[in-house]
Image: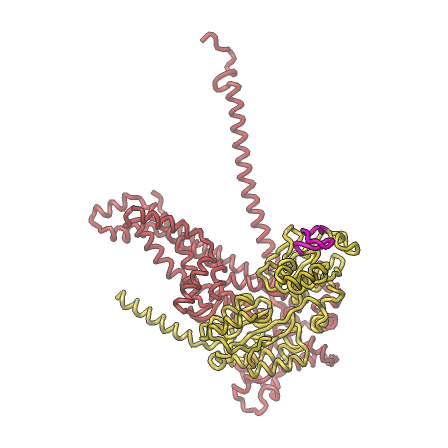
Amino acid sequence: MLNKTLGLAIVASVAFAGQALARDQIRIVGSSTVFPFSTAVAEEFGTKGTFKTPVVESTGSGGGLKLFCAGVGTEHPDITNASRRIKVSEVEKCAAAGVTDITEVKIGFDGIVLANSKAAKPVELTKKQIFQALAKQVPVDGKLVDNPYQKWSDIDPSLPDTKIEVLGPPPTSGTRDAFVELAMEGGAKKFDTLKALRKSDKKAFKSVAHAIREDGAFIEAGENDNLIVQKLVANPAALGIFGFSFLDQNADRIQGGVVGGVEPTFENISKGDYGISRSLYFYVKGAHVGKVPGIEEFVAEFTSEDTFGEFGYLTDKGLIPLSEADRAKIRADATSMAKLKMM
Amino acid sequence: MTDTPNDPKASGWYGEKYSANLKKRHKSERLFRRLGLSAILIALGLLGILLFSIVGKGYTAFIQTYITLDITFSESVIDKDGTRDPVKMRSASYGNLVRDALRKEFPEVTQRRDLRALFGLVSKDATQQLRKMIAADPSLIGKTIPVRMLASDDVDMFEKGYISRDVVQDDRRVKDNELEWLDALQADGAISTHFNTRFFTGGDSREPEMAGIWGAMVGSFYTLIVTFLISFPIGVMSAIYLEEFAPKNKLTDIIEVNINNLAAVPSIVFGLLGLAIFLNVAHLPRSAPLVGGMTLALMTLPTIIIASRAAIRAVPDSIRQAALGLGASPQQAAFHHILPLAMPGILTGTIIGLSQALGETAPLLMIGMVAFIADIPGGVFDPATVMPVQIFLWADSPERAFVEKTSGAIMVLLGFLIFMNAIAVVLRKKFERRW
């Protein structure tokens, strides 16, 4: 009796597992920055009724690409989101696992803002000042020393006479990566000594430019951007680093800082004037198109004008759209499943 | 004896040394009591603050703002050919019905940008709602009836007072013209608030006003069922074997130490184990409650084994001896006498282990259950998420309206935890035997 039930259970579970392998639902993994956009499209796609709502996992850009590149077959995801471009090393890893046919779709921009509470004065900084305020080591009189600046006015007398206190994401976050790459590195390049270092020893330059101070002026506030917003409201003296969509949603309580003379507004970011913005992507596994139903239709939905266009519903979610010409080109490439070319 | 001082207070129970000592002991007694009391007060105070902030933020999640509009189900939009073909009628643009109704209400709005804002007052859900109404009752076509539709999340936030009128227009999610329209609708009595049933019956959504926790609750249910079905029998059997049958030697000592160690292992480690075994080796589907339940069962097992062993050990030896003396085999003694008597303790331990599993997110991250899943799972193989994961995902969403949803979901989760722990207490009180 017991043997019989056990046997039945095993047969049943194998049958179910076999059934689950033939998937009728798109599976998406990847960046937590693209997650709000990807899920919005997934939901819209599902309510149209022809296909099931895709399952979207938030694994981070790197984690998503790792899963994506693990192989071809329905146990692997069909699409991965990324808040940065795929790396050459990742393309190679993909190819080694048989994932050769990849389509890249750029969906728009995301700005990273330095913001503070409305109760305080708006901030105006240059990338150089951001680097001076947050780097672990800064050049003073041509020599690298541990960051001596405690107050903003120590960096530049025109800045307020308040303690440097910046809340930001931890190193595991894609926002942090982009911030370090765009703002910190951009600021570091403004120093002649570091610029020279960059030419002679790129690695050494990066280790200086990417190191954020650990003496309490920069506070790691966790992955949750909402938390940073709440802390900023409670503490008007502090600055916070997070994605533009959170500024967009909380514009009555916090204000975005001007960086390099440009305000972080929708228009400035989409024109490319604002200095700390990055492109968002998703990647489609060509081998799964036609095997898992709905992938082509999902890509078409994502790249339709109603979705990622200037007045599409993703802009309501905080996505900053590409230019019209770019959109048309990307739509054409995406719907024809053009293969990824690394440049 | 004549040398002793006459004053009795100088020595013995009344001696100076003794009374000083007594004073000291009393003092330390009082200090300890005060420390204990203040520890409890601090804990209660913090619990109060937590509950207050969650309930204060979250109670509004249970009510939702609706807009009632006169919708004309015009035949030209829904069914151009008049064939009443359900497939064709399903693909009609029901958004037009809502837009027409809003246009009729506010004929002065003509600019594209303004119209967009105007149409944004009503949630996207209205389209679905009207589609369902027509599917259920095609005779509505051609009629005009008032329909109560969900308002968008910004309108809802405004009506609940989270968005202030006094802020400059640019910094407000609800702009001046939208305020005007809302005031006009309010004057017509078209705006109303009702109990948010959708919060308890709907799946996840990216639109805060449409989001519900039913999907996560069903996911949690399936996951916990799997966890229970695996961890309870294995846990209880191991406990019985280790307590009643296993020889006491080095090997069982090692096993015992390891079980105690496992109970203290961080839960993410079990997630990695689940990823390695259930997904990479056994090729079970990702994000499935089956895998989640199996992973959480690994985590719950040590708790159940330890609690069960304690409960079995608490059964007096005399009962064991009496059963054996009357000719029962050791197996009969264990299953007929000891296990039933130990059951209240075992169940208490199991429920505590399961409520721990109910609140767990870390191991589920590794096996793909931290995901956006809009459909309600229909079984243990369907992709699903669980309640704490839902809370985590909402807490991370930029939309302001998700703040109250997060707190609302936390309240529901706390309700479940209290319920489960109450069952544990009741079981213990009801079946506990004292010897």
Q: Quadrant of the N terminus of chain A?
A: bottom left
- Regarding residue A227, the answer to whether it shows in the image is no
Residue B122 vertical placement versus B49 (above, below): below
Q: Nearer the viewer, residue A200 or B183?
A: A200
Residue A155 horizontal/vertical position (percent):
75, 54
Furthest-left residue in this view: B327
Q: Quadrant of the C terminus of chain A?
A: bottom right
Question: Quick check: A49 left or right of A230?
Answer: left
Residue B44 horizontal/vertical position (percent):
55, 47
Question: Quick check: A3 left or right of B383?
Answer: left
- Regarding residue B84, the answer to whether it shows in the image is yes
Residue A123 horizontal/vertical position (percent):
74, 60
Specify the colour of chain B.
Answer: red
Instruction: Say which residue appears at 73% left-offset and 66% top-offset.
Output: B171
Residue A271: which quarter of the image?
bottom right
Q: Nearer the viewer, residue A219 or B416?
A: A219
Q: Nearer the viewer, residue B247 or B359?
A: B247
Instruction: Say which residue appears at 49% left-offset and 58% top-offset.
Output: B359
Region in magenta: A135-150
Instruction: Say which residue appears at 52% left-offset and 20% top-offset.
Output: B17
Instruction: Say which residue appears at 39% left-offset and 53% top-offset.
Output: B302
Specify the colour of chain A.
Answer: yellow
